[in-house]
Amino acid sequence: MAENTPGTDAPATVTIPEKPALEGLEEKYSTAWRENGTYSFDEDTVRADVYSIDTPPPTASGSLHVGHMFSYTQTDVIARYQRMTGKNVFYPLGWDDNGLPTERRVQNYYGVRCDPTRPYVEGYRPPEKPAKNQRDWDVVSRENFIELCEELAVEDEKVFEHLFMTLGLSVDWDRTYRTIDARSRKVSQLAFLKDLEGGNAYLAEAPTMWDVTFRTAVAQAELEDKEREGAYHRIAFHGHDGAKVWIETTRPELLASCVALVAHPEDERYRELFGTTVTSPLFGVEVEVKAHELAQPDKGSGIAMICTFGDTTDVTWWRELDLPTRALVGRDGRFARETPEWITDDAGRERYERLSGATVFSAQKAVVEMLAETGEMEGEPKRITHPVKFYEKGDKPLEIVTSRQWYIRNGGRDAERRETLLERGREISWHPGFMRSRYENWVEGLNGDWLVSRQRFFGVPIPVWYPLDAEGEPDYARPLLPSEAQLPVDPASQAPEGYAPEQRDQPGGFAADPDVLDTWATSSLTPQIATGWAEDERLHAATFPMDLRPQGHDIIRTWLFSTMVRAETLAGSVPWSHTALSGWILDPDRKKMSKSKGNVVVPNDVLEKYGADAVRYWAASARLGADTAYDEGQMKIGRRLAIKLLNASKFVLMQGVDSSAVIGRGATAATVTNGLDRSLIAQLDAVVAAATEAFENYEYARALQLAESFFWTFTDDYVELVKDRAYGARGPEEQASVHAALATTLDALLRLFAPFLPFATDEVWSWWREGTVHRAAWPSTEGYAEIAAAGDAEVLTVVGRALSGLRKSKSEAKVKQRTEVLSGTVSAPSEVLGRIRAGLEDLKAAGNVRSLDLAEGGEEIQVADVALATEA
């Protein structure tokens, strides 16, 4: 890296603009950084020199919001710090265009629909004007659809890229990927095949959470509870002795799929019933009464009916009690049209006809009416509000249907694997640390393996075919798999090796798995995609496991956990050593910003209004994990800071200071002879040490606070105190001392602020230094440790307070600050007076003081008996 060794480059000519300004810096430097490869990763490296970042790929088809600026800035300040410490930073960026948002956008934009069974059309172009009616849209193959997704995604990504460049993200723009491009599809399919080979992936017919709107299976991590109105219905089952067993249920429509009643084993009310059978109302089906610890004696009547399937508890009971499967609700959300074989009672079969093909809503209404007619429901339904499970993107309650799906083992049904994943979580450094408990709570609360197949057209196809027997039935136990060289494949349009295309769906031929992989099944592989897994082993070895995964705390259960699962199954390791969790952006009413609430802010407007450095200041002022209010007031403070940095730097350099005055580049420790100058360097030494420690602990907000506080001390106190000496009023030796202190401090401040205010700092750097501050080294205390040891950090502090006292006296007298002080007295404890003496001449010059007495006394610095000259 250039400039990591002080003193290696010749002093640059100092060139200062007449009126420094922030305007235009984003375009000037973002273009220069990209053209010069300022942030390019050097592949000629070893792992120990690399800092590797698993950057979140934003959904390119979504709209931009301030949350992007917030979280990505926090990652960027860490990346910039690591680069300045000498690390070879691997900082790629992906675009998440594999998913439902892209699918819908492409459909509407081009007027096309995907049918995986359609053949690929070379050179296909969609209509210039999409048909208004969806029935008239072009129907295209999956390969053609993916091509259109990639084409539109590129255009959408240009908008994001411009935003991120304007914001000053130091990503390597030569290392981008899309989660639906050929490389990502290959990695996703290869990882699936390796998981299948290793016994970590499997196909099973099982109860599945199902969204009837999107017609797709839903994983546990995608569930969301929503409060909905419902009702308890008190319904009678019939014992052989004529006794009624009352249950209370919110799902009376599922009576026909009842397989058992269940009560707690310690519930004395039902002990005598355990092992006996009762008959269901309406349908006359005999079911057994079972005991299970999950039954709640204090809920309803204390005994519940088990249906296949009403909720996830039904699934647990069904599995653990080894109950039969009597599923009736299909993938379309409607009841089966054929009367089920287990209903043998004529009256029951007749009643079921009223449910045949009905929606869940209509079926419930019909069942309640029939229960009222037969007198098997007691009283009116009791209205309640209760949590109901939804797909996070859906607007109808989920059903549980029985279907054949692909799963990846995640510890949900395997205690040993679960413990392994918990241990992996403890190997990672969490920032902030308390976030680890969210991960552990999620892992410990899993109730099933990760369902990774989805019934959608667009996505990464599951790379599997099934041989068909003589009757045309698939043999799911002997799947046909592609070789690695064939990947990526689309089984719906390509034939497996050894088969001809004409054998598709024919007896003795083959059938393609119709499903695609869950988007998280690909996103969980961003470390593998970015680092060249299975393609560039040299790059992969130099960058994996990665160093940092930054992300939102709300997707620990999805993205973070799924990535942990895949790193364990594919590499037996953690995917990264650190994870940094950012908080949410809240509106002024402390509510989370979201498009659905209509309270989001468009980032382009804010960047144009305040500038990138100001926006970055706001984002970097927030600690990791902290939900932060959108605050333009903070941006105004950041803008003032950036402007002050330009102007203060101009003043310092106007004193004739150049890079040769920086200690270690021309000046030496012996150059700094003045006590006040040594005090400044001592304070700088402490700030650099503390800011470095903060960054090493991922407390970048603390590092910013330290640098900013010191900067204002430097400009408001030190610069004001030494102006007279800087102009040479006390001779060349004193001038050299102050110049060395000014140059060294400015040099360090630019480096300290560089991760936060990249544009303003590089602008100032260009006035007096060669290259870019972003390839310069992070400031080190080694260069001025000798001065700091000889200096007293408190000298500048107490002299600054004395100067404030003089200024206050003039303000109270309502005279100008340049008014001469004829005489005055500063009183303070003896130790403090000794420090004031070290900077007395600078204090008198800055306060325009003719005579100043120092008197011992009191506990604080007091300025008194100030006699002011009469203003002309």
Image (spheres, grey):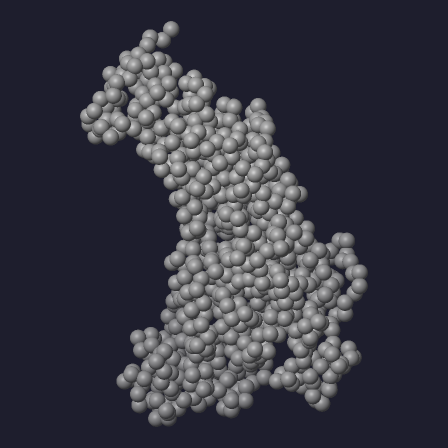
Horizontal and vertical percent position of residue 720: 41, 24
Horizontal and vertical percent position of residue 802: 31, 25
Depth order, front residue of 293/363: 293
Would residue 850 be visible to someone looking at this image? Answer: yes
Q: Residue shown at 30%/87% (left/top)? A: 271
Figure check: 106 above or below 388: above
Q: In the image, 134: left or right of 727?
A: right
Q: Residue shown at 38%/27% (left/top)? A: 674
Q: Residue shown at 54%/70% (left/top)? A: 571
Horizontal and vertical percent position of residue 290: 38, 86
Q: Residue furthest top?
A: 872
The picture quadrant where one finds residue 770 is top right
Q: In the image, 136: left or right of 255?
A: right
Would residue 218 be visible to someone looking at this image? Answer: no
Q: How many marks?
A: 0
Figure check: 280 above or below 120: below
Horizontal and vertical percent position of residue 436: 41, 61
Q: Residue shown at 35%/35% (left/top)? A: 790
The picture quadrant where one finds residue 374 is bottom left
Q: Residue furthest left?
A: 857
The picture quadrant where one finds residue 724 is top left
Figure check: 683 above or below 548: above
Depth order, front residue of 332/611: 611
Q: Residue furthest bottom?
A: 241
Depth order, front residue of 760/103: 760
Where's the C terminus, which quadrant? top left
Depth order, front residue of 864/830: 830
Q: In the image, 215: left or right of 814?
A: right
